[in-house]
Amino acid sequence: MKDLSALVSNNHNQNVEELKELLRIPSISSLSEHKEDIQKAASWIANKLESIGMEHVEIIQTNGHPIIYGDWLHQENAPTVLVYGHYDVQPVDPIHLWETPPFEPTIRDEKIFARGATDDKGQTFLHIKAVETLLKLENKLPVNVKFCIEGEEEIGSPNLSPFLFDHKEKLSCDVVVISDSDMWDKGIPAITYSLRGLCSLEFSLKTANSDLHSGMFGGGVQNANHLLVQLLSTLHDANGKINVDHFYDDVVELTEFEKEQIKALGLDEEKLKRSLGLTDLTGGENNFPYPERISSRPTLEINGLWGGFQGEGTKTVIPNEAHAKITCRLVNNQNPEKIQGLIKKHLEEHAPKGCTVKVSLRDIGNPFLTPIDSPMIKKAAQAYQNVYGKAPVYKREGGSIPIVSDFNQSLDVPVVLMGFGLPDENLHAPNEHFNLENFDKGILTICSFLELLND
């Protein structure tokens, strides 16, 4: 490890400059005007993989943005690791809140500021540099390595999921490693062993065949906005429990060990309230502790609702249409399509008299869970211990990365989430950044993990 550390330290400045090259490419996957930039970023990744010694490097075109593949397969009796990451980024709006331009990487206070710095160019780049470092030092790797890096994660990975199922042999491995998550805090590494799933719906509620004059019809016909509020109020009880029949049927309760792990994280709720400008942290199922509610309990949220006159001033109408958007975060063992069906049924059966309801089913993503005591998780924990000098905490993540479950299901191997970002690095927001203290340590931790896999 001493020689490895020296090599990483000596190459620090060069490695950061190379990361800056990648961060300068505005590879925003959701905006069509950046299609050429997506191709440019894909080429940059492919060229970098070739330059560090990866073989069979391909830029695989899809119906959307490209997938980059590369491998090094020369350890016959060693396991194979598949590294996943993504090179696409979120839009930069609102641009006026950026202190420096989002695609002009800038270092301030030992942090590199740019869109994609932590999500996920910076973290994916750590794996490329780890492999390069090991090859420079030993002229070989301790294990076999494959890379699968996509350009559509920020738009839901529509083409990667079928690619995984269609190319199982090409991507076959013993473990998938992903760095697209965060540590618990500065100097405190974390392994995310669970991700919540996702499903979304949108529905419209309609009364009369047009908006009506409130003077002529007020008090005599139904108001779509009133009925919308009435219907939405049936979705939760007074304690925040979701009132949809059978919603909780497949929820697996936490073990006492998991509850203790969550409690041991020591979330400072008073500090959190102050930072959010809140007087309390009620919300969701109030019979459960706050840390459990945001990580290991399912949710049903009303994300948007509208109806009637939206312009300036007053318009005295009775709206004939009202609309709402709903999303759910789902926990291990819940099926997104089943939950969509249950909510759709609830909305239709509880629709107030005098209206019709039309429900549209939207995006879904499966939840993911890896047992804390799995062998791959233990090796990842040891790698963090070797570099950071302390064991990682184990946490359930409240957010969703649907493609993680797809990797798990399509390749039937464990997935290890080794994050090196910090919770306050503004991913998806202005002034996104990556703390450089985790740059060299991240490279060394990944190197340690690869070496441990061949013990």
Image (tube, helix red, strand yellow):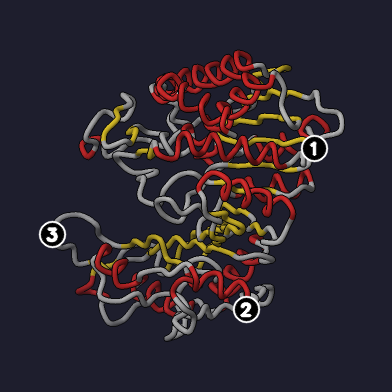
Mark 1 and mark 3: span between their CA atoms? 67 Å
Indicate the amino acid at tag 1: Pro
Residue position marked by numbered label 3 in the rendering: 313
| Relative image position of residue 245 (x, y in whole percent) | 61, 80
Q: Is residue 127 above or below residue 190?
A: above
Mark 1 vs 2: CB contact within 8 A? no
Mark 3 vs 2: CB contact within 8 A? no
Quadrant location of the N terminus in the rendered image:
top right
Residue position marked by numbered label 2 in the rendering: 256
Quadrant location of the C terminus in the rendered image:
top right
| Residue situated in front as seen by the camera: 449 or 245 | 449
Dot placed on the residue nearer the N-terminal end, 1 or 3: 1
| Relative image position of residue 44 (x, y in whole percent) | 52, 17
Please report the residue visible at 65 percent of the width from the left and 35 percent of the height from the top.
Answer: 83
Indicate the amino acid at tag 3: Gly
| Residue situated in front as seen by the camera: 451 or 312 | 451
Please report the residue visible at 86 percent of the width from the left and 28 percent of the height from the top.
Answer: 76
Mark 1 and mark 2: span between their CA atoms? 33 Å
Q: Is residue 352 among the parts visible in the rendering?
A: no
Mark 3 and mark 2: span between their CA atoms? 56 Å
Q: Which of the 4 image quarters holds residue 133?
A: top right
Q: Secondary structure at mark 3?
A: loop
Q: Secondary structure at mark 1?
A: loop
Residue position marked by numbered label 1 in the rendering: 79
Dot placed on the residue nearer the N-terminal end, 1 or 2: 1
